[in-house]
Image (cartoon, rainbow, N blue to C red):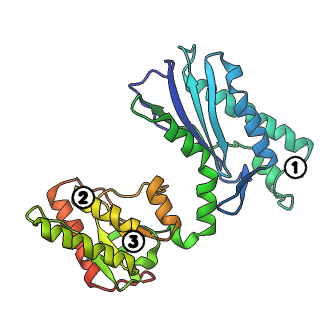
Amino acid sequence: MPRDYNHDYRSRCIYHITITKAPLIPSFSFVKGSSEAVRLELTPIGTVIEKNIRAIPQYCPHLRLLQYVVMPDHIHFLIFVTARIEKPLGSYIGMFKVKTGQEIRNLFLATPHAHNNPHSSDAITHLSGPIFNPDFYDRILRPTHSLNVIFNYIRTNPHRLRVRQLNPNFFQRINQLSIMGTSWQAYGNLHLLDNPFKRQVVVHRRDSEEERQRNLTLSIYYASNGGVLVSPFISEAEKRIRKEAEAAGAKIILITNESFPEKFKPAAHNFILCEQGKLLIMAPLKTMPPTRQTFMLLNSLAEHLEKNFICSSC
């Protein structure tokens, strides 16, 4: 993947590394259990990968492994370059990938049925090629990043995957949803579009305090009675309504101006709402600039959704 060409990858820094599985390679692990008691079971391939992740510090005394997880189709690890290193970090990651691939192929040539799908006659053929996709993703942790947030993200990867597996209807994605003559993306509980009791949340600057309080009261009423609140929730007043309505059990259709990346996943709070079936995120196919015109369009969409029945399966 493209590197940050302004960054010195030999310098002291913490990196969040992601490496993905090559398409035909068997899974690295399986995520099982309930959403409250998730367990990650490594396949023989995953076991080799884990061993080699833990051995990365052996390549250089200035590489310190902070955390890792071996998911079914990718791996994450957090690595701390504690002092300037002789080679760019990518060289050591390349060593890891090569060594891991060699050990996996040696294992499967010695024990052909060691993979997670012993009935697949193609497994050994697939393992003759690369185990991982080319290159890797890296995120450079700046002083503004919370290390605890990154630790938690890696640690809870299996939980988030298991939740999506157990609640597929709450994590649906549509890339072409035609509304008001425009195509939108949607992610989350699509059935919220079917709810006939939707209410647009919009607070105008000219609204009096009395009008704002009435707006909040009505929003909480809808939230408490199974309705859906629809809004981009731009202003602080609108965000306050969302927060208090969610405390009352609100279902939310959140309209954003930023399009979804290829592998979009809602983060943190929004993920929890998706898990509960209480959130649908709508986005344009192409990111719109955060201008007054854009926000007026998003509010127009919210108004349209409030006044019109939208079939989620159409």
Q: 163 or 119, which is in the foreground?
A: 163
**Is 16 drawn above or below residue 170 in the view shown?**
above
Q: Residue at x 50, y 34 (%)?
A: 147
| Residue 214: image location, x then y, percent | 20, 73
Taking 286 as reference, is 121 left or right?
Answer: right
| Residue 184: image location, x then y, percent | 34, 69
Disc 2 target residue: 234
Q: Quadrant of residue 241?
A: bottom left
Question: Marks 3 and 1, how far apart in space?
Answer: 49 Å
> The C terminus appears in which quarter of the rendering?
bottom left
Taking 170 as reference, is 114 left or right?
Answer: right
Disc 3 target residue: 250
Label 3 SS: loop
Asked whether the residues under the numbered discs 1 and 2 touch, taking CB atoms below 8 Å apart as contact, a structural biologist would say no
Question: How dense is the environment of label 3, judged by Cα within 10 Å: few (below 14), some, or many (20 and up)?
Answer: many
Taking 282 as reference, is 294 left or right?
Answer: left
Asked whether the residues under the numbered discs 3 and 1 touch, taking CB atoms below 8 Å apart as contact, a structural biologist would say no
Q: 80 or 314, which is in the foreground?
A: 80
Residue type highlighted by circle 3: Ala
**Is 311 drawn above or below residue 267 in the view shown?**
below
Question: How dense is the environment of label 1, judged by Cα within 10 Å: few (below 14), some, or many (20 and up)?
Answer: some
| Residue 136: image location, x then y, percent | 56, 38
* For discs 1 and 2, the disc positioned in front in the rendered view: 2
Q: Residue at x 47, y 72 (%)?
A: 189
* For discs 3 and 1, the disc positioned in front in the rendered view: 3
Residue type highlighted by circle 2: Ile
Question: How dense is the environment of label 2, judged by Cα within 10 Å: few (below 14), some, or many (20 and up)?
Answer: some
| Of callouts 3 and 1, the N-terminal one | 1
| Residue 209: image location, x then y, percent | 13, 65
Label 2 SS: loop
Disc 1 target residue: 114
Question: Marks 1 and 2, how far apart in space?
Answer: 53 Å
